[in-house]
Amino acid sequence: MKRIILIILRNLYRIPFIWFKLCHYAKHSDRYSEKQKYSFIRKIARWMVNGGRITLEVYGAEHIPQESGFMIFPNHQGLFDGFAIVQALEVPFSTVYKKELENVPFMKQVFSCVKAIPLNREDIRQGLEVINKVADEVKEGRNFMIFSEGTRSKNGNQLLDFKGGSFKSAIKAKCPIMPIALIDSYKVFDVHSIKRITVQVHLLEPLQYEDYKEMKAAQIASVVKESIEKTVEKHSQNESKNLEDGRI
């Protein structure tokens, strides 16, 4: 909460402009290119980083696929994750998000700008529709992000199990799968401090379709999780240090 207040106070003069332009883009989304809207969201993310005393370290930019039509699978630590990845990736991407967030101010407008797809986790039929819709859009050259854990981890840099079903869109699209390892992203909003913090974003080598075409969804989930987990363990600090200021 303290850092949210800091971000707001240090960007107070920008907030009317951000809100007006974000709402305009959201309301007239089809008038503007994906690149235009994404560029503005990247600016918002940069203002959050600078205003929140956050140092963002990005590694592995050479692993970003040269052609669009790929899927991103990060670990999930908190509300800042998406903005960290937006800052790390110059190429636009959309996301699948839980339906409960669709009417949250600010998030609603961001989701509208990137034409994100809501998921009702209680509706199996709608879940299948989302899988097919994402696959179709990826085939057409859009990039999508899915948090395979389904919800954020509440244990710092420790990962939850990755759900195999979240990879079915990639299998249908036969697209590259890029794992992303987030380290200390949870500290941005979950730690009771406004001391400068460092968040790491590791863009890992993608799995090409040839690498996983013989695997089942659960096996792909296991491989992606293992890749992220090894990176987090290698680069994160001791967990006791990570949690020294406490969590909400």
Image (cartoon, rainbow, N blue to C red):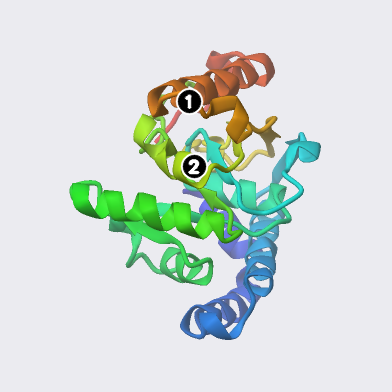
Q: Is residue 72 left or right of residue 105?
A: right
Q: Is residue 131 left or right of residue 30?
A: left
Q: Tell me: residue 216, above or below residue 190.
A: above
Q: Type of residue at label 1?
A: Ile
Report the residue at 60% width, 26% height from top: 211
The residue that label 1 is drawn on is 220
Residue at far right of view:
62
Q: Type of residue at label 2?
A: Ala
In the rendering, at what x and y percent does residue 44 appear? 64, 64
Report the residue at 69% width, 39% height from top: 196
Q: Label 2 near label 1: C-beta < 8 Å?
A: yes
Number of disc labels: 2
Q: Relative to the observer, which residue lies in front, 66 or 195?
A: 66
In the rendering, at what x and y percent does residue 27 appear? 47, 83
- Which numbered disc covers residue 21? none
Secondary structure found at label 1: helix
Q: Tell me: residue 187, above or below residue 49.
A: above
Q: Is residue 214 visible?
A: yes
Q: Is residue 193 left or right of residue 200?
A: left
In the rendering, at what x and y percent does residue 179 appear? 59, 33
The residue that label 2 is drawn on is 170
